[in-house]
Image (cartoon, rainbow, N blue to C red):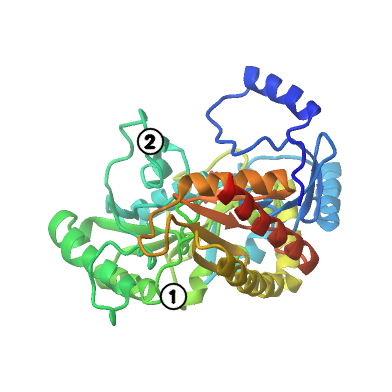
Amino acid sequence: MKPMDVPGEKTKAYLKRDKAVVSQSYPRAFPFMMDHGKGSEVWDVDGNRFVDFAAGIAVCATGHSHPEVVEAIKNQADKFLHISSDFYHPVWIEFSERIAATAPFSEPAKIFLGNSGTEAVEAAIKLARYHTNRQHFIGFYGGFHGRTMGSLSFTASKSIYRDRFAPLMSGVTHVPFPDPYRPIFAHDEHEDYGEVVVRYIEEMVLAKAIPPEDCAGILVEPIQGEGGYVIPPDGFFPALRRLCDKYGILLIVDEVQTGVGRTGKWWAVEHWGVEPDIVAFAKGIASGMPLGGIMAKASVMDWPTGAHGNTFGGNPISCQAGIVTLNLVENGLLENAAEMGEYILDALVEIQGRHDSLGDIRGKGLMIGAEFVEDRESRKPASELRDRIVQESFRRGLITLGSGKSSVRFAPPLNIDKTLVDEALNIFDAAITAASTS
Ligand code: PLP
């Protein structure tokens, strides 16, 4: 499989202009300069075609420019673009009703809307403090929750995200996330490692550092995204729920990356049959339009008028795109994500047989991680190899992203088909070979 000559000349010219004017703080893995996209395929400004296994960081749930999403956006744009959250409009209400109907709660849900994942997390933090009138929180190492000051106080996946930004919000204590491939606490092999971590939270953190009656919430991703697509052991979420119930602590799940069908269920926390109190969502919810928010049990969303708000919340175009996205996920994409996810996992096991460096493969639905190691015995992360694989994939026509220290994440649109999956996996296989011999 011959690599393409990328970046092409047009891309190079744009890169020069980008460098002069765009903040260099954005982490760009490789020079993909988008021209247009359709479904799970994207083209750069030089006419090169790629299969998109990143979907704009797990955002383009329905693929690029899904015709029904585009039509809804155009129709709404003809009517009005904005009215602000000081007023009402029917599309906002309809979207809220629709997403509330998917909530993993046994009581009615209420919805707060913003524009992004980080704003969703900010809203969750503020609501938890307001509702409980408590100050402290527990977050997890490896977690990523955004980059504004509140959410950044929980983000602990790379220290560069925090460098020189202190002081952050006080009251956040981090604990290890239960990574079954890299457990850091010694434990009996018959014990569920997720329960071991929850025991540590209770017996160390709550007993020795944070009085439980002053702990407002535990904020956690059901599957760590930026942290390496890490899936906790099955006992983790049920044990966390029990702990929260025991001390009146809110269980807040950050489903910004895992939500809206990405893992083959509406909300990833449903894989463990656990009811959270607050769910943060964004990314895939409006197929690429900026939209994020929280849903909370109605009994938890008890803040008064004026307590929280924004200008753009409930934007009508984003809400229209959100309604169509929810329709499409409900009518086939959930099943496709589950089915294609299984298919990719099986194929990756086969690929693993050819590459010793592929240490671990894990995933639910279309949220799949492949972790590279120096050798399977030591499990030492092979970070440089992973970076080369992402580059070699790009050169051969596959867009992927790294996550964690040495994982590649697969998060294609939820409507990807088998033909494109096969093409992508062939490229990935070839890219591992090329990266391993270079
Ligand atoms: N939470 C999770 C789990 C995420 O993966 C992200 C972004 O990657 C965020 C929050 C922040 O979202 P945004 O970049 O839209 O602010």
Distance of label 1 from label 2 (alpha carbons): 32 Å
Amino acid type assigned to the residue bearing label 2 in the image: Arg
Residue 128 in sight in this render: yes
Measuring from the top left, give residue 200's x and y in whole percent. 22, 65
Farthest residue in the left direction? 208
Q: Which residue: 62% across, 54% down? A: 433
326 shown above or below 48: below
The residue indicated by pointer 2 is: 162
Q: Quadrant of residue 115?
A: top right
128 shown above or below 114: below
Measuring from the top left, give residue 162's x and y in whole percent. 38, 35
Instruction: Count the numbered circles shown.
Output: 2
The residue indicated by pointer 1 is: 274
273 shown above or below 210: below
Q: Quadrant of residue 81?
A: top right
Disc 2 is placed on an element classified as loop
Disc 1 is placed on an element classified as loop
Measuring from the top left, give residue 176's x and y in whole percent. 31, 58
Residue 92 in sight in this render: no
23 shown above or below 390: above
Image quarter of the C terminus? top right
Q: Earlier in the sequence, mark 1 or mark 2?
A: 2
